[in-house]
Amino acid sequence: MSEIVTVNSLIKLYREKGIDGLKNLDEVEIYGWVRTNRPSGQLAFLELHDGTHFLSLQLVYKKDNSQFEMMSHLKMGASIKATGHLVSSPSAKQPFELQVKSVELIGDVAEDYPLQKKRASFEFLREQAYLRPRANTFQAVYRVRSVLAFAIHSFFQERGFVYVHTPIITGNDAEGAGQLFQVATEGEHPFTDFFGKEAHLTVSGQLHGEAFALAFKDIYTFGPTFRAEHSNTPRHASEFWMIEPEMAFCDLKGDMNIIESCLKYAIQKVMDSCPDEIAFFNQFIAPGLKEKLEHVLHSAFAHMTYTAAIEHLEKAVKDGHKFDNSHIYWGMDLQSEHERYLCENIAKGPLFLTDYPKEIKAFYMKENPDGKTVAAVDLLVPGEGELVGGSQREDDPEKLKIKMGNLKDMDWYYNLRRYGGCPHAGFGIGFDRLLMYVTGMQNIRDVQLFPRTSNALKY
Amino acid sequence: MSEIVTVNSLIKLYREKGIDGLKNLDEVEIYGWVRTNRPSGQLAFLELHDGTHFLSLQLVYKKDNSQFEMMSHLKMGASIKATGHLVSSPSAKQPFELQVKSVELIGDVAEDYPLQKKRASFEFLREQAYLRPRANTFQAVYRVRSVLAFAIHSFFQERGFVYVHTPIITGNDAEGAGQLFQVATEGEHPFTDFFGKEAHLTVSGQLHGEAFALAFKDIYTFGPTFRAEHSNTPRHASEFWMIEPEMAFCDLKGDMNIIESCLKYAIQKVMDSCPDEIAFFNQFIAPGLKEKLEHVLHSAFAHMTYTAAIEHLEKAVKDGHKFDNSHIYWGMDLQSEHERYLCENIAKGPLFLTDYPKEIKAFYMKENPDGKTVAAVDLLVPGEGELVGGSQREDDPEKLKIKMGNLKDMDWYYNLRRYGGCPHAGFGIGFDRLLMYVTGMQNIRDVQLFPRTSNALKY
């Protein structure tokens, strides 16, 4: 009986016990897909990828093997079972390889297989979204996606935060955070028949999350959110995952502490768990990535008020710095170029920008004593701009009521302030953008599985 | 300076170091909400709940405290800050209590606060969905929900499964698993303008998940799914979370092994992490719950084919057992009463029922060599019926094509069999139903945060 192994189990064993650990194994059996197959002379080399690790396993088979002819015709993408013994490899690429005893073809590949050996462009692969996870870059992206998601869960769970599933279908457009998708039923009046009122896809779980923070102290959401916007940019999608923690008895300072710890924890976990993937991104996708991430891990994030930021930007313009929009004034909404200037040129690293004018921020943010600004924070990072947005929430029922205006069906949100309210704060991280930041990938369509944007719903 | 503590940190410290660990603390500061407040004579007792633990902390304050009058008027639900020293408690209810030095009222409670001391019915609390997480039962339900969700993630991550976010908005109704919600945009033609085709809310991530299993070997989804059905039962909701693992190079036997390990792992984690919550459910919600869960942990799940099940049911009818539907025949779809009879009376525990007639199962399930049945499995559990459903998938492209019929835009799914296909299998767990099973709660509306059912979209 041979032992079933995976590339991941072999690499683990090798990293623990060295080559002897592998040589001590009896005959092994491994399942996976052919990446490359290069018969040449007396020896042939087949690269087997089984999806359990970023790296592949080299299979070596000899001309005198009775299956040599069959093996040499195995095509890229075919699924196979191989048995043999592990030996140390003379190649520089990997320390061990499988000396093949026998191979079985499990699933062949039709001639029209779209992934051929030559390097395919990201644009081409987007059209083959169901096959691209087999490509090297996407093996790295989606594994980091999984590790990053679990790191986020681990961070909050270790700190006692309660994970809440806020609803996807919602009856209120609370935040005004963008265009909404409506939810309808087939064959019925599309808008109100099923639920008895208009229903939308959520743009944020925050407001529902606040109700749970006022019962559990610390909670977080992690789920999909939606925008029906026709934004055709590399950073916008109609469907994306958000993480929205909310903490009772917490102010803006506490909020920022958690943002900083959370990001550092998540980045550290990815670097620890995915060294091969990060090395790949660093080499082929985003040179300097590793240094950037290490810098984030080891620096204290800077802090600056919006008011100070405006002064910095005004000075920059005076000193001759060219922005696309150089009309800088207190009260303006900062664009990405301004945000990047502040963190790249002034802070030279991640920067918490706080205390924005109340007019340009959401109704639920807590008014500062100056009457002009709110206790809001955006985390700006070099190369990206805004990565996280948060705020302390308005807990004064009267002030909130004025700012809410006539948001229908939102009495319950107001009531949270009348029934044992307290200072509370929270933030939102766009998970897909965080993944772009951690991998250096430049298009949100290339970090999501099956991206949804306007006119794109192939799968 | 007093040290900020939580109920959870105190109970942890107590369970590690005993009462001395608490007595050694200097003055502490704690934030939370008033559960009860009973001034009587020279002493008064205030139960403080801070959401970090199922249990509360008893605050004791004395008549000679200059704040006694103010404290004695603190209302249920008010948020407060209390400082004082921890001492051992003469009460049998808890081993320690806080001797109050001072209290500060942070957020008062309006007179119309709907949660008053008397026991409120689940029906009443459903109408107050934004406040019910403050009630004892729902503190327990939602904390177990969070722990159970993280246990699921931990199980799969520890085994190297890649977590995938399959899309919520989808262009194909592949499974025919039920009525669909349509996704439209406001102010445009509701059905096709945004995406250029009809868009729906997903009923399952399985088909997209299969594409990723054929690249990563083992993957799992964990996300929301939807049904636009007017089913007004305690087990149906329009929005619920599903876990859908998918494994390449895996058959039905491997599938069942993972189902069994996964459930046992998750139940064990909940019992280890939430002993107070499980004790509460066992006492007040579902007597016998703890024994039921322990039985699941320590028994091997039974196996039976559908064909054998029909024989058992026919015998039961012959022996006088009354079903609502006693017309038993090979080919019938089993109802919940039949499923429960099989696991409760025959298997006396969790039962894998396998190899169903192909006519009553989905098109993607693998046909068995007999040509009549498919490699499908349902896990039946006492008291519930079906808890998990899975199958090996049809990997023969020609057989699949016949069964798919004219599912439009599904070439990609068929192609997965032509491009290095292999035996693969997976299953689906309705997360909310699993939570009902683990807590003993009887209505899906009472384990979800803001349940969505027809005509219910208050929040």
Image (spheres, coloured by chain):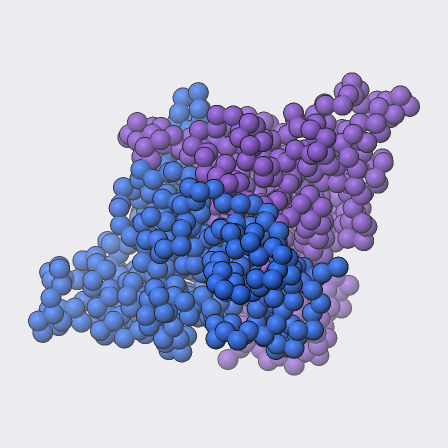
Chain colours: A blue, B purple
Taking the image as shown, residue B60 lies to the left or right of residue A125, namely right
Taking the image as drawn, is residue A77 in sight? Answer: yes
Taking the image as shown, residue B329 lies to the left or right of residue B213, namely right
- Horizontal and vertical percent for residue B418? 51, 40
Q: Which residue appears at 26% of the width and 45% of the height?
A: A231
Q: How many marks?
A: 0
- Horizontal and vertical percent for residue B410? 46, 34
- Horizontal and vertical percent for residue B89? 73, 69
Foreground pick, B188 / A44: A44
**Residue occupying the far right of the picture:** B319
From this view, report whether residue B226 is shown above or below residue A285.
above
Q: Which residue appears at 79% of the width and 21% of the height?
A: B328
From this view, report whether residue B358 is shown above or below residue A396.
above
- Horizontal and vertical percent for residue B9? 61, 69
**Residue occupying the far top of the picture:** B327
The N terminus of chain A, quarter of image: bottom right
Foreground pick, B232 / A149: A149
The C terminus of chain A, quarter of image: top left
Foreground pick, A371 / A301: A301
Foreground pick, B167 / B76: B167
Taking the image as drawn, is residue B6 in sight? Answer: no
